[in-house]
Each structure stands twice: as C-alpha cells, then as structure tokens.
Image (spheres, grey):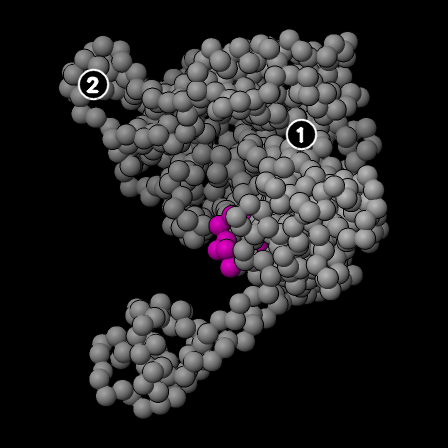
Amino acid sequence: MDHLAPAATSSASSTRVVDVLVPVALDQAYSYRVPRGMELEPGDVVCVPLGPREVVAVVWAKNHHPDPRLHNRLKDVGEKLDVPPLKAELRALVDWVAKYTLSARGMVLRMTLRMGEHLGPERTRTGVRLIGAPPQRMTPARRRLIELLSDGLLHGKSDAAKQAGVSVGVIDGLIDEGTLHAEPLPPAPPPPAPDPSFAVPDFSRQQRAAVDAMRALAASGSFHVALLDGVTGSGKTEVYFEAVAEIVRRGKQALILMPEIALTGQFLDRFARRFGVRPLEWHSELTPRTRARNWAAIAAGHAHVVVGARSALFMPYADLGLIVVDEEHDQAYKQEDGAHYHARDMAVKRASIAKIPIVLASATPSVETEVNARKGRYQRVMLPARFGGQHMPQIEAIDLRRESPPRGRFISPRLAEEIRTAVERKEQALLFLNRRGYAPLTLCRACGHRFACTICDAWLVDHRFRQRLVCHHCGFSMPRPDACPHCAAEQTLAAVGPGVERLQEEAAALFPDARTMVLSSDLVTSIETMRSELNEIAEGRVDIIIGTQLVAKGHNFPRLNLVGVVDADLGLSNGDPRAAERTFQLLNQVIGRAGREQGFGIGYLQTHQPEHPVMKALVACDREAFYESEIASRERTGYPPFGRLASLIVSAGDRPGTESFARRLAAVAPADPRIQVLGPAEAPLAVIKGRYRFRLLVKSARGVDLSEYLREWLSLGPKTKGNLKLEVDVDPQSFL
C-alpha cells in the first residue's frame, strides 16, 4: 500500500503529520498528512484513504518528527467526521486489550467503530403529508395510502409505504400530482432520561444494607470492584439499580453488561418500571441505522444508561461513571473469535483506567471472582435470602443406577410423577437438558454407520423440527435420509440419546393434556419471537417448558415450581478444567428458576454420580463446600486463578502441514522454569470446517507476564503462510 507509511520519528518536518489507527488487522498506526486548514487532535474520528477505498479511522497521536524520506509517500487525511473524539481512556483500553490478548490494535479499535459508513451526522429523512385533492386516477394502492395519511400528519416516507403495503413509487406519483407534499422529517429526539426517583422499591432489611453499599459505591467516584453476591431471586437487579440511579443523579452514564442481551425483555420491563423509561440497547440485532443513532447518543452523552452485550464495553461513552456486569460468571462474556477477550475482565480493566466503580453480580460467582473477594481485592455485598420471604428450592438427586427410566425413555418414573402432580396443581414444570435438537447421534442399526459432518470431527445432530441432520460446529446440514447411505438399508436409522426436541416428544406422550414449549437457541428466529415465547410462559400459557441453557439466563416465571434436570452429568465429562465449576453454576441457576414467587420450589437432578462433589454440594445447598473443594483443587494443580493459561491453535487444510508447523513452533519456545508448554496434540475437535487443528497449551505461574512471553515466542517461531492459521487465546474458556 504505497499511500501508507508506518509512523516514523527520525527527523523534523514542517509538514503536519498524524499517526492514524485504522480498524483492520494491523497492529501499528500509519502516518497521514493533515490538510491545510484542518485541525486534528488524538482521538478525532477521520476518513482516510486505504487502498481503493476510504475507511473510518482514529487519530492516535501527533507525529512531530515524521521521516522526511516518507514525505512524498504520505496521503492526506480525507475528512474529519463531526462526531465526538475517542477519549484517552478508551484509546488506552484499546492499546491494553490488544497487548494483553496479542490482537492487532486495529481489530480492537474496530469494536469501537462498529458503524463504518453510518458514522457521522444522521442523514435527513423524508416525510410526506396529505395536502391536496385526491388524484383523478384512483387505484387500490393509492386509496390505502391516502386513508393512512388522512390524519394530515407528517409520516416517514418509507414507513408510510410499508404500513400501506405500497411501493415508494406510489408515494412519488402522488407527490408529482400534488396530492402529497414531501418535507424533511425532524431529527430523532435524544433518548429520554431515566428518572432515578420514578419508583424506588420498598426494600427488605437485608436488601437495604446492600442498597446502601451500592449507593456509596456509585457516589465514591473512584475505581472500586464490588461483588453483589445474592442467591437466585434475592433482588440483585433491583439492588444494583440503586447504584445506577445514583450515577444518573450525578449526570454520568451507566453501562449494564448482560450475557444474552437478545433475551432480556423482562429485564427491560423491570428497568422501565423502576426508571420510567427503557434504557438504550446495544447488541448485534439492531439495524445499522439504529446502531449508528445509538452510537452517536452514547458518544454525545445523551444515553444515560446502556444495556448491552459484551461489545457495548468498547463504546465511546462521553462520561462513563459505572459499569455493572450481570451474571458475571457466564461463559458468554468470552469472545471466541477475532480478539479473544473476556468482557468481565476487560470491564474491570476499563473501570480501572477510567477510575470508576464496577459491580459484578452473580448467584454463583466465577472461581476467579470468588477468590478475589476472599482475598479482599473485591468488596463482597451479600444478599443471602430471597425477596419476599420465599424459600430457596429443595434439591433431590435421582440415582439413575437405581431409578432408571423405561427403555427408550429419558424421564425417570419419579420425575414423571412429580411433573404430573405439578401440572394437576396448575403449576409449571421445567425439563432442562443442555443439548439442542432431537438426538446427538444417528446411526444405522444394520451396519453401524454413524452420520458425521463431512468437514468437521463431529457427529451430525438430528433436528426433527427442521427434518435435517446438522453440525453444531460449522453449520453443515443435510436432509434426514430414508435409507442408510452406507449399506442402503431402509427403516434402520436410529436416533441415539436425547435432545430437547426428543424430550418434548416424550413429555407429550406422558402428559397428553399438558401444553409444552421448547426453548432452544436454534429455534429462535428473532428477538421478538423469543420475547413473545417468554411472555407466554410468564403468563401461564405453558405447562411444561423443555429448555437448554437458554432458560437459565435470569428469567422470572411466576408459576414455575418444579425443575427436572434430565442429565445432570452432561457437562462433567468433557476434559474441561472448568467443567465442575460450569456444571455447578448452570444447575444452580436453572434450579433457581423454581419457587421464586409462589409455592415451594423443588429441583430433581437425574444423575449417575450422586456422590460427585458437584451433586453433593447442590443437594446439600452447600455452596461453600463446592467453592472450598474447587478452589483447593485449582490451587493444588496451579490452574487459574492460581496460575495462568494460554491456548495456541494451529489449523490448516492438511494434517501433516498443520502438525509440522505446530511442532516447529513448540521447538522454539523460550525456556522458562515458571512456564510449561504442553503439546502439540490434536485438539479435542480435531477438524472443523475442513481444517485440521493442533493445540499447544501454555501453563504458567500467576505472576508471569504471559502475554509478553507469548509475544517473544511468536517472534522466534515460523511464520504462517497460505491458509495456515495460528490463533492465540490468553485465558481460554473453551478447550475444544
């Protein structure tokens, strides 16, 4: 790219030059000339030429000593955009995240500039108004449009066409004939400000102590981390809302991060009941224009409270005063592609850089957060009881070695009887199985052929609702055949094991009069559909819910009093160092859906290992016993948070080349007695999308600068060529 020159500082020049960071996979800033009459400062958002196109980028620094040899190679900054500059605090976060995760700085910057061509002043939208007599030639389309506009008000042109079910050409024709008049629509008003005094709840005595702590935290105006540690149903949301209210009173902005923003209709309603208006949303399902409008509102300080997915952390807040990370233990906070960052950890870092308080909320804190609270690094604010005097659910284990379901069934007789009783009492029951689809494996009973993905090292999952066999790793799918493709036998294909769709089939057979619904991410067609289904459950129009981990995400179902976990052992046998922690958290959360508002909640764990420490801790409702055991195990083995991990995945289209590169990379790892390099070995999922995968796992003592070690190692290693790819994941959450 002859128009770009790496930032240089070798000699003085009268030409004004700035170093600009572009949101592409480049780690360094590049130098551009500042045109005469343009004033630029670090943080300004600009358009610069990049190859044949112009891209939105950010001035990272002034270059007071550009290399005169590069003068003729430099291109001019094209335009300074009329948007607020990125503050030094956010630029420091971009630099820090890139360094820590070994990501290109441009790729981290990209997360702050999600708008691309939509950045800048909002384009003027056209509206139409009915002003004249009806046209001489009247058609059904024209009649529908005129009826819609008969109120004489100004309607958006595209909105009017959509509502009337006509093309924009129909509107243009009526404008030409003088029936309609086109005029600019006024700009959208800024989002309404939440009212911190709109509806302050009547808190219990235990909640009031936590509320006081939250308000004091928000008022401190300095960096401080608090763990809001409350059992399910204790009112954590209402309590941290008081920290948000205090921030709003002080004229600052609050960010609430959630693991699944698309599933938070109930949360948005709760916010509106407390503050009188909904917060601003930030997630991938927003339209590009809405995202641009919300980005501008955040940058201008008009968005007082933002509720968002992990990417909301990188927005350019005008005056951020508080961060809340709800369900801080949730695995969804880890970004698994691009820059491999953990939003919870990066939120703590952003709060540290900005010198603001942060609240981490959870009923089952991550082991890392629990250890930080025990060591006094984080303040612990407790909510030990449910709001309104409701009891925590009772939990019982069903030993499948003694109480197994009938052959071909997956619901044990005792659980089936309890569900029948609950339905007769007009209460809801939840069957939980963290496995999508109908069955995880399909095989031929005649020849034993198993249906596997053609480009992944994974079995195809039977999805009966869609009539397809699907790979959950690459998305490959095929129609479910009538005959075995290996031996051509017909009527021999068998589904092995249960998924939620198969559970619904079994529930329908056992309870034919009950209304059932499956909640699973692969069946969600839109946010609106999901929120509608959740409302149906909350309103009592469903008797039995069959769900994956989707149902554990903080939903409130007033009539739900029974939860049956169909396969409680599912997450314990995958070789993941965090398997016990994740299973405990997930099952605790899902059983915590029961008995939140009325009646007594009860949870049943169908398990083959009732003696497992996770099962024993759940049945005894002894959270402390689980943490004591898990923390001791981590400390003994040197796993996080008592040590550090990094994963290096080498992948390519051929196995020998992939393994050879991984071995050459391992051979040049710098020797350090504090660091172990394990592997290379085939990754547990050895092939994904036709790419062979080898993994190296790096394990170090806690105090080691692992990012710097990796950076030095990679500088010594072989360079990737062709389609060979090396992915580095510092602090990995997935071990597949």
Pick the front one: 278 or 79: 79
Query: Is label 2 in a helix, a strand or a loop?
Result: loop
User: Residue 664, position in %: x, y?
Assistant: 60, 10
Query: Residue 338's spot in the image, x, y percent?
Result: 57, 35
The reply to whether the magenta stretch includes residue 379 is no
Report whether 287 appears left or right of 645: left
The residue singled out by tag 2 in the image is: 484
- Residue drawn at x 75%, y 61% is 39
Disc 1 crowd rating (10 Å Cα; few below 14, some 14-19, many 20+) is: many
Residue lying at 39% horizontally and 38% vertically, measured from the top left: 522
Task: In this rendered view, identify the residue nearer to me: 32 or 704.
Answer: 32
Of the residues shown, which amino acid type is indicated by label 2? Cys
Residue 726, position in %: x, y? 57, 23
Q: What residue sits right under mark 1 in the picture?
A: 102
Residue 544 marker: none
Q: Is residue 280 a member of the stretch shown in magenta? A: yes
* Helix, strand or loop status at disc 1: loop
Q: Is residue 75 left or right of residue 462?
A: right
